[in-house]
Image (cartoon, helix red, strand yellow):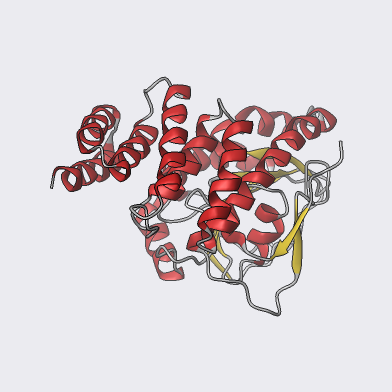
Amino acid sequence: MKRPLLTIALVAGLVTPVLAADIPAPKPAQMEIAIGSLTVGDKAPALTINKWVKGSEVSSFTPGKVTVVEFWATWCGPCKKSMPHLSELQKQYADKGVTIIGVTSIDSRGNTLGAVEKMTAEKGDTMGYTVAWDQDRQTSNAYMVAAAQPGIPTAFIVDQTGTIAWIGSPFEMDEPLAKIVAGKWDLAAAKSEIEPKQQANVGMMKFTTSAREKNISGMIEAGRKVLEANAKDGDTLNMIAWTIVDPARGFDLAGNPKLVALALEAAKKANDASGGKDPGTLDTLAWAYFASGDKNAAIATEKKAIELAKGDMKKELEESLAKFQK
């Protein structure tokens, strides 16, 4: 299958759940990269890291060894949730030569080197794997943008030959990792599975580009296409909606009712896809209701989210509820 290509400037902000609006604009001197130019079966790009925050430096992929390159951020809830699991996997496969590297980069939401170092120290064994700081976003772009991956956390498993063998959520990589380490992985099948998803992601990344540029009409146009193509993909729909209604984003929602309508439709479909049981999706829907002026629905929906949430997420949702009630 021919890969979808979309040439853009090197902007890794196209790849986070809160997306391109969080990322500084690219410098004029930055090279261009093609979205969708990297897929399963390709040689893994070199790791260009500014600082190794935890663990030993990984200057290259060692033949015969498997490496997991995972992208995350300090503010990303799912990323923090995946940390204990990544630590367990690192411990489980340490004697088999597997190295897990959490790579993170600067953005406008407080994901600074200081914040990364602080979280890494505080998490301790909960982040029991290598942590790397990609200040210039070269590694983030070489992997995330090139592979058309618009959300984090995302993991890339690099096999014993330095080839990308799998791309996906760290929550779903147990089976692929086990088979890759054992030398029983079907690379061709994995490639066939990921490429259609990458093609769909190109549309999502057009949406995120518009979000970064505050191009409302572009967001609506691209967002509508993504919504139509991913009518039952709860994660993608939730990302569309949250990018619009996230209060940290600062969009003029009152002055753009069509944008709000897109967010509300996407959030409703995302909630349907999750069966109304995912607190994060319910929170997005609550904010979409709030943006549309339906305060009562926002409060009722947020209360449902709080009932399902635990830990830090529950506290955050309670803060949102308080804002709605005011």
Q: Residue furthest left?
A: 326
Q: Residue furthest top?
A: 275
Q: Residue furthest bottom?
A: 29
Q: Give the residue displayed 16% in from the left and 45% down from the top.
A: 322
Tally of numbered discs: 0
The spot of residue 80 in percent (x, y) is: 42, 46
Q: Work out whether 263 lies above or below 45.
A: above
* In the displayed structure image, the side of residue 234 where residue 3 appears, left or right: right
The spot of residue 294 in percent (x, y) is: 25, 37
Identify which residue, 7 or 187, lies in the foreground. Answer: 7
- Residue 181 seen by the camera: yes
Quarter location, residue 252: bottom left
Q: Work out whether 168 lies above or below 118.
A: above
Q: Give the residue displayed 54% in from the left and 51% down from the top.
A: 219
Q: Give the residue displayed 50% in from the left and 62% down from the top.
A: 214
* In the displayed structure image, the side of residue 156 where residue 242 appears, left or right: left
Quarter location, residue 277: top left
The spot of residue 44 in percent (x, y) is: 77, 52
Identify which residue, 255 or 85, lies in the foreground. Answer: 255
Identify which residue, 171 or 280, lies in the foreground. Answer: 280
- Residue 126 seen by the camera: no
Quadrant the N terminus occupies: top right
Q: Give the residue displayed 61% in from the left and 43% down from the top.
A: 94
